[in-house]
Image: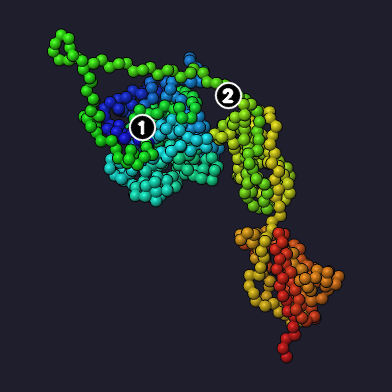
Amino acid sequence: MAAQFGRRLRRGATTTAVAAAAVAALSASQAPGITHATTGDSQGASEATPPPGTPVTGNSPYYTDLPSLNTPDRPGTSIDLPATGTTEAGIPATVLAAYKQAERTIAGSDPGCHVPWQLLAAIGKVESGQARGGRVDAEGTTLSPIRGPVLNGVGFANISDTDNGAYDGDSTHDRAVGPMQFIPSTWETWGQDANADGRRDPNNIYDAALAAGRYLCADGRDLAVKSDLDRAILGYNHSREYLRTVLSWFDYYKRGSHEVPDGTGVLPVSNGPDSSDSAASTPTPPSGPAGSPSPKPKPSVPNPGGGAPTPKPTPPPTPTPPPPTTAPTPAPVSRIEKAGTGELTTMAGHVFTERAVVRVKNTAGRTVPNQAVRFDVVGDTDTRFTGGKASVTLYTGADGTVASPALQAGEKTGAFTVRATVVGRVLPAVDFAATVTVRAADTIARTEEKALTAAPGTEFADLVEVKATYKGAIASGVAVTATMITSADDPAVNDPAVNDKGPYFKDADGKTVRTLTELKTDADGVLKLPKIYADDQTGTFLLRLTTPGGASVVIELKVAAAPA
């Protein structure tokens, strides 16, 4: 929804004619499985209707520039695509990596959608000129915010503030934000954390590209089906002109593209979204016929033969030197190393708070983006990555790093290994030691404070119930040992050979026992002890409960004769 403010508002015959010519020339190269429906306007767009609801961009303006009719060819055709070719086909490296990562991520989680990265690139082109020509940092975040015009109903939609200015800096009205131009309310629904930094940032191209892809795949759409493709794009911006513009760039990028350094991408000629409030808050007013700017008069020179002066000839534009025809060959990948991972340890049944993080470098010592890395759980353990997988392949980000998915510990305790290897290269692996400890509790206490009493030779009327927690959370499945003792301070006198009087439990055979070890808290961290019996000894006795982790509680048991 980025925005060519002036040209977006004047939809004259010239723009439509150019769009028609461009799409007609490009429509011969569709993605596999996509067939254009024939329409009366020859634009290659079916008559799909946009999905209901507010569009992703709030129908903000967008770049209307169209690709050159001289499109790059695919490698393997009559002319192989060079490393650098038509300027418009160049996509900044980090932006391109984000599109391709989004395609891979969605292919793994929603393979029936068939979202191609070229479609994300086409939307990124018309929304923000590929993040202003790739002006992003190493993490993929734009160097300055990209914001569309204020959606205050003056030339655009009227959308009142939904985020208190958190994303767009405007607490009165909404503005579309980021390289894929999400309005704040839509971002709250579709925002993603694609670079695993713990934030959903619409100004980060990795987060924004994945969010755009997720939206395009919504409602079970299959983008290899033309009607689903058109409906998805129209859901981004409810405009058939927008649909035709995106499809023209989609076709163009499918014919070929290449990577260019960040910050060197070609910016569209038309106006676009601006981070300044003054430039982006209002549309450019029309100043000529059909909303076109009035042309400036050309300077003139006197006519030697008399009469009206003749116009001064316009000097030809200074030619722009062509880009190089070849790109330097990147240095080969040479090593994989740890990148700041903390200790991998957790209790049985819990999720590991840390992840294995590695960095891939080449022989020049530079980090390598978009490199496949495989993580494997190795050893005698039932711990698995999220989703129950023991192996998973991910790709490094723009900074050459990649983190494994979160680890979910099973019930088997002990040590194991998380191993990271570079796919397609024979390099030493990186191993991370990991440990699963027994379930533990740091607090255990009775659920009520009622006194526990019994007469000699009877059973205690009330059962003992306790609850265990760990760091304030429920501690389920924690082992508990219950022991009858005679002194809380002197463990020597609690030896079963000495402590053979007072309250007791019964085992499965009905025999007297004063220690129970096969006890565990339930899903709510609660444990109810079996019945406790009193022998003929009267007095005050003690029951101690202990857990792994050091939590313990001592409970009084009183045996007294009933009053006469």
When asked about the image quadrant of residue 560, the answer is bottom right
Query: CB under 8 Å between callouts 2 and 1?
Result: no
Density class for disc 2 (Cα within 10 Å; few <14, some 14-19, many ≥20) is: few
Q: Which one is closest to the eye, mark 2 or mark 1? A: 2
> Quick check: 41 left or right of 56?
left
Q: Secondary structure at mark 2?
A: loop
The amino acid type, in three-letter code, at marker 2 is Pro
Q: Secondary structure at mark 1?
A: loop
* Label number found at residue 63: 1
* Residue 67 point in image, percent of width and height: 38, 25
Judging depth in this view, the residue of 455 and 303 nearest the camera is 303
* Residue 176 point in image, percent of width and height: 38, 42
Tell me which numbered mark, 2 or 1, is placed earlier along the sequence: 1
Q: Which residue is mark 2?
A: 330
Density class for disc 1 (Cα within 10 Å; few <14, some 14-19, many ≥20) is: many
The amino acid type, in three-letter code, at marker 1 is Tyr
When asked about the image quadrant of residue 552, the answer is bottom right
When asked about the image quadrant of residue 86, the answer is top left
Judging depth in this view, the residue of 61 and 73 nearest the camera is 61
Q: Residue furthest right?
A: 497
> Quick check: 425 left or right of 163?
right
* Label number found at residue 448: none
Residue shown at 14% from the left, 11% from the top = 306
